[in-house]
Image (tube, rainbow, N blue to C red):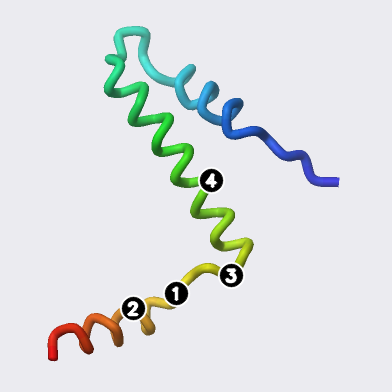
Amino acid sequence: MATTISLRDMAVEAIKQLPETSSAEEIMYQINLVANVVEGLKDIENGKTHTTEDVLKKIKQWRK
């Protein structure tokens, strides 16, 4: 059985690793980083990804 860690708990752990003198901006950056990583992992689980090859093909089409 896999243990699921909440987004809140991951953000708290990331913030705990910051220096005591961290600014509000640095703290918000860490919260956003964790949220984006979690979102990306969910996209992977749901098959919402693109290969590098597919992306490069699309870029070439844009240049035409």
Q: Are the residues flagged by discs 1 and 4 in contact, CB closer than 8 Å?
A: no
Q: Is residue 60 above or below residue 5?
A: below
Instruction: Identify residue for label 4.
Output: 38
Q: Which residue is mark 2?
A: 55
Whether residues under marks 2 and 1 lie with C-beta atoms below 8 angstroms apart, the answer is: yes
Q: Residue furthest top?
A: 20
Type of amino acid under label 2: Val
Q: CA distance from mark 4 to mark 2?
A: 22 Å
Dot 2: few (<14), some (14–19), or many (≥20) neighbours within 10 Å? few
Q: Earlier in the sequence, mark 2 or mark 3?
A: 3
The numbered mark, 3 or 4, whose residue comes first in the sequence reads: 4
Query: What amino acid type is highlighted by mark number 4?
Result: Val
At numbered mark 1, what does the secondary structure look like: helix, strand or loop?
loop
Q: Residue at x 49, y 54 (%)?
A: 40
Q: Position of residue 30 (x, y in %)?
A: 39, 30
Q: Residue furthest right?
A: 1
- Mark 2 to mark 3 CA distance (whole Å): 15 Å
Q: Badge 1 is on which residue?
A: 50
In space, the residues marked 2 and 1 are separated at their CA atoms by 7 Å
Disc 3/disc 4 C-alpha distance (Å): 14 Å
Residue at 72% x, 39% y is 4
Q: Position of residue 59 (x, y in %)?
A: 23, 81
